[in-house]
């Protein structure tokens, strides 16, 4: 029997209706649901001589009541969903045939025969004459025709529906072109029409798209009501701002003294000069302190970012929101994820979708599956598994057609369409013909890859270097490191010539900065190293040192016999070459290690500070150094002065002068290295 029903659906799939119908009837007793579905399909179609909606209704009812398990035959998948879909189709066709004829007999026949019709369709049938009459009047699709129905049947149960139709027709007639001018006229002359609310909102949307503060203000002044007034004012506020500086805020109040949230702006102006810093207390909760170490917003958040443009992002109980410098929410919305504001807009995530919101919390973009930005001007977004770009106004900049799309750097981003190419922010597309391509660098060049070899291309799609190298990387000042067969050399893209030949021993473990600082170039031949300038002149010849590092503060770190030391530019020794470890000079100091002792030395080799079995680190990139002794942290200056003894389990820099210090007992302190004051928080 299974074979019979399969053959029936095979016949149906090739439109052999005679054979399919015969086989379905043979299967109806043992496979009632599947056979009935097939028969209903045949009778529901109008491309065969058996087309009959009454018979289709009979068999789709059998299929619905007898259905138990899903099955697939040929191209047909029979499930409760497909049965319901076919039933809907049959009922819809029958409704058009019987009910829309407009007589009682046909309506009754429909109700008794088409048992799977929805309640809404049945209700339409029960509406009888009033619905038939109203249908006849609305067929003219005009407000005048519906007026005749309202005048003729003032007691009808459908009177309210007809009245709404009248208002809808009137609205559509008067705003047919959907222009700003038509919406404005409708708001002036048709105030009794309840659709004025839609005209007002549509007018606001069209005005928003102009990105004109003057147009927004005119809308607020002449066309806005309580429906849109708050939203329009917030749009005007967001559109007027770029940096949310005190000057911008003050000017806004001067231009729009009637702004309903003036007090909020004045408060923001007063708070703009206050610097607040997010700090985590011993209970792992974040709050905000001022530069004197006073809690201004008490610890209560699970996470917090720095204030930017007058507001900060905080997270609490798995929700993220924005606060002002008094700790109050900027707006009531919360998000699953969010980022800081840049130029008045922020990326937020809610229910797995990403949006752009303005400073007032208004969504100004479509929903996307992903969204990233590098500069706050352009946003690379993912929609239905393809990528495109919008700007900070939420407008489409690059269509959603790309499999991959990189972040924009120097006006260009890479894209992928089977192969890689480049696209600009002005939608200038360079041909996709590479296996890989880098971002465009500051020299307006990209490294390209083809068949596992690298080359260098400009924005005219010309190859400055052919794709025949194993590795190419930008160093600095238009200089590129090129590698071939584990040998390296340097290429000057500005002069379009090689500075050196590609003949020196390359070690992939070394970073690009190891080989050049953009002025001098390190050449490695076996265990010998030399430094040359851009003209190929040797400043340090081969064989003098085991390794040479680029000068910092006019002092060169060198290595010889696995020991480190320092020489000046004339190679005159500043220290003996006897340190086990050493860093380059940072300003006037360097860190060295010898026999389990760490030293801080100056440019004359003088020891400023030493510590046995400890460490000194310059991770803060300032004149302040971290001191580590027996696993605890302290601070010293680049003069060797001890600011804080090594008694803190953790020290983090808040700025160049402020440091958070945590002790094992849970206490947290703020240290100001300018005033040299330590305050317990």
Image: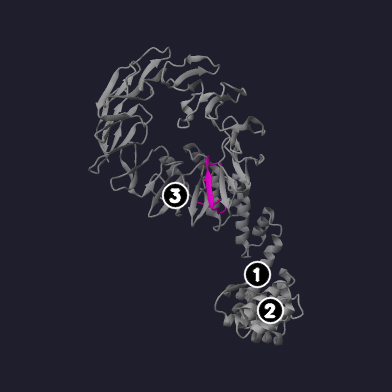
Give the x, y percent position of residue 631: 26, 36
- Quadrant where the image shows the C terminus: top left
Report the mark closest to the observer, 2 or 1.
Answer: 1
Q: In which image quadrant can residue 138 be found?
A: bottom right
Q: Which numbered dot is residue 75?
A: 1
CA gap, disc 2 to disc 1? 28 Å
Q: Is residue 568 left or right of residue 19?
A: left
Q: Is residue 425 left or right of residue 648?
A: right
CA gap, disc 2 to disc 3? 54 Å
Up/down of 536 relative to 616, above or below: above
Q: Which residue does the image show at 57% across and 21% down from the upper left? A: 499
Give the x, y percent position of residue 560: 38, 19
Q: Which residue is mark 3?
A: 330
Give the x, y percent position of residue 519: 51, 20
Q: Nearer the viewer, residue 471 or 41?
A: 471
| Residue segment shown in magenta | 360-377
Q: How many marks?
A: 3
Q: Dominant secondary structure of the magenta stretch?
A: loop
Q: Which numbered dot is residue 451?
A: none
What is the secondary structure assignment of the residue under circle 2? Answer: helix
What is the secondary structure assignment of the residue under circle 1? Answer: loop
What is the secondary structure assignment of the residue under circle 3? Answer: loop
Q: Which residue does the image show at 55% across and 47% down from the upper left? A: 236
- Tell me if label 2 and label 3 are in contact, CB under 8 Å: no
Looking at marks 2 and 3 on the same chain, the residue that comes earlier in the sequence is marked by: 2
């Amino acid at each position: 029997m299974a074979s019979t029903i399969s053959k029936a659906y095979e016949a149906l799939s090739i439109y052999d209706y005679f054979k399919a119908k015969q086989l379905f009837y043979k299967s109806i007793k043992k496979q009632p649901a599947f056979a009935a579905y097939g028969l209903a399909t045949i009778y529901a179609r109008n491309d065969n001589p058996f087309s009959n909606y009454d018979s289709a209704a009979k068999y789709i009812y059998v299929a619905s009541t007898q259905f138990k398990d899903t099955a697939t035959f040929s191209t047909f998948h029979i499930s409760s969903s497909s049965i319901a879909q076919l039933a809907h189709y049959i009922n819809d066709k029958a409704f058009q045939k019987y009910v829309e004829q407009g007589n009682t007999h046909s309506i009754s026949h429909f109700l008794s025969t088409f048992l799977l019709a929805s309640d809404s369709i049945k209700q339409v049938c029960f509406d009888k004459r009033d619905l038939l009459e109203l249908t006849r009047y609305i067929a003219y699709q005009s407000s005048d025709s519906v007026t005749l129905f309202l005048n003729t049947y003032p007691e009808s149960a459908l009177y309210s529906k007809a009245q709404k139709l009248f208002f809808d027709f009137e609205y559509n007639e008067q705003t047919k072109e959907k222009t700003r001018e038509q919406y404005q006229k409708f708001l002036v002359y048709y105030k009794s029409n309840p659709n004025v609310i839609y005209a007002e909102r549509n007018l606001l949307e069209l005005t928003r798209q102009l990105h004109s503060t003057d147009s927004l203000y005119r809308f607020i002044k002449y066309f806005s009501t309580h429906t849109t007034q708050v939203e329009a004012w917030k749009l005007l506020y967001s559109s007027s701002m770029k940096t949310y500086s005190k000057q911008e805020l003050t000017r806004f109040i001067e231009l729009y003294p009637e702004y309903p949230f003036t007090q909020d702006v004045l408060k923001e102006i007063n708070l703009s000069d206050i610097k607040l810093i997010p700090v985590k207390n011993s209970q792992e909760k974040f709050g905000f302190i001022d530069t004197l170490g006073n809690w201004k917003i008490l610890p209560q958040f699970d996470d917090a970012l720095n204030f930017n443009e007058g507001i900060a992002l905080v997270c609490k109980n798995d929700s993220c929101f924005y606060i002002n410098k008094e700790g109050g929410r900027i707006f009531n919305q919360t998000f699953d994820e969010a980022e800081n504001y840049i130029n008045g807009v922020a990326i937020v995530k809610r229910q797995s979708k990403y949006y752009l919101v303005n400073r007032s919390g208004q969504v100004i973009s479509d929903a996307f599956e992903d969204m990233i930005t590098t500069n706050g001007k352009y946003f690379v977004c993912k929609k239905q598994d393809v990528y495109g770009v919008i700007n900070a106004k939420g407008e489409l900049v690059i269509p959603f057609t790309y499999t991959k799309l990189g972040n924009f750097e120097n006006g260009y981003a890479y894209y992928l369409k089977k192969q890689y190419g480049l696209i600009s922010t002005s939608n200038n597309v360079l041909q996709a013909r590479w296996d890989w391509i880098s971002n465009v660098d500051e020299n307006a060049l990209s490294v390209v890859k083809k068949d596992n070899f690298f080359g260098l291309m400009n924005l005219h799609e010309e190859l400055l270097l052919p794709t025949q190298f194993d590795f190419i990387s930008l160093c600095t000042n238009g200089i590129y490191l090129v590698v071939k067969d584990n040998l390296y050399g340097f290429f000057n893209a500005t002069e379009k010539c090689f500075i050196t030949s590609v003949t020196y021993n390359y070690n992939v473990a070394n970073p690009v900065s190891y080989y050049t600082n953009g002025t001098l170039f390190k050449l490695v031949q076996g265990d010998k190293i030399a430094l040359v300038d851009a003209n190929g002149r040797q400043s340090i010849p081969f064989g003098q040192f085991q390794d040479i590092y680029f000068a910092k503060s006019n002092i060169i770190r060198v290595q010889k016999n696995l020991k480190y030391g320092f020489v000046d530019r004339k190679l005159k020794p500043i220290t003996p070459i006897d340190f086990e470890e050493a860093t380059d000079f940072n300003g006037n100091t360097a860190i060295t290690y010898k026999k389990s002792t760490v030293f801080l030395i100056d440019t004359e080799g003088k020891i400023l500070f030493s510590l046995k079995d400890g460490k000194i680190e310059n991770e803060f990139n300032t004149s302040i150094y971290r001191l580590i002794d027996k696993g605890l942290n302290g601070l010293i200056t680049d003069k060797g002065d001890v600011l804080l003894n090594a008694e803190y389990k953790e020290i983090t820099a808040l700025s160049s002068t402020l440091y958070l210090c945590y002790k094992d007992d849970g206490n947290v302190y703020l240290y100001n290295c300018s005033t040299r004051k330590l305050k317990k928080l």
